[in-house]
Amino acid sequence: MLHIVDHPFVRAKLTVLRDCTTPSSRFRECVREITCFIAAEALRGVELESCRIKTPLAETTGYRIAERIVFVPILRAGLGMLEAAESLVPGSPAGFIGLERDPVTKLPREYYCKLPEATPRSFAVLLDPMLATGNSLAAAADLLKRAGFHRIAAVTIISAPEGKKVFEARHPEIEIFTGCLDERLDENKYIVPGLGDAGDRIFGTVHR
Ligand code: URA
């Protein structure tokens, strides 16, 4: 299931990201800002445990995150979201998945995968700004499941209907949280209207 995080700040920040005149430094900053909103929604159902603490005035009950959140960016664009996601749950471990398109099959092929141990209380959150064809996100979820993660969510900034369909068919139980569901993919598999190549814009390489 795909959830659109329809917050006015998300809409305003999406506009900055889509604007082709936004410089790379601001783009990167804005990716971090919007990731906080979307990732916070993805973690809304996280389990808490209560604890007793003292304020300067009295003893009271507080809450701590009881699950072990593991953020997993898909290289390279997902890296731009990691710091912001991690700021929500400081000290959480991170895993990394690198996928590239096989020139013959055109399907994603793993070139790097480094994941922390999957413990019974682990909740893995995939980070990838663009859900385009859905093949990479679905392949990354396959890797997480193979590594023993059972509780998984995905955070994207913009999604395409084509990617939503592919991902939901392969991983119907994994919830996706996104900033917007755009119109379609173009012939090069870019999301329209989208924001161009997220990795290039985050890291200041080529502008589209
Ligand atoms: N990846 C991107 O960076 N942009 C798209 O539009 C699609 C995939």
Image: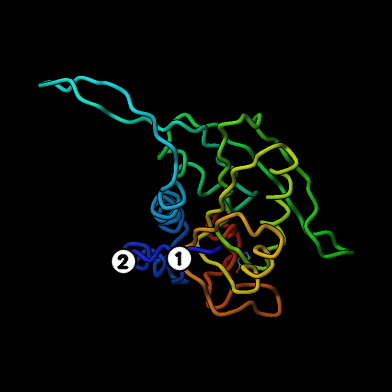
60 left or right of 68? left
Q: Secondary structure at mark 2?
A: helix
Q: Which residue is mark 1?
A: 4
Q: Is residue 194 above or below residue 141?
A: below
Image spot of residue 114 (x, y percent): 70, 35
Which of the two residues, 12 or 154, is positioned nearer the viewer here? 154
User: Label 2 crowding class (10 Å Cα cut-off): few <14, some 14-19, many 20+?
Assistant: few
Q: CA distance from mark 1 to mark 2?
A: 12 Å
45 left or right of 8? right
Q: Which residue is mark 2?
A: 8
Numbered circle sitting on residue 71: none
**Nearer to us: label 1 or label 2:** 1
Q: Residue at x 71, y 60 (%)?
A: 170
Residue extending farthest right? 104
Q: Is residue 69 above or below residue 187?
A: above
Which of the two residues, 181 or 44, is positioned nearer the viewer here? 44
Q: Amino acid at mark 2?
A: Pro
Q: Amino acid at mark 1?
A: Ile
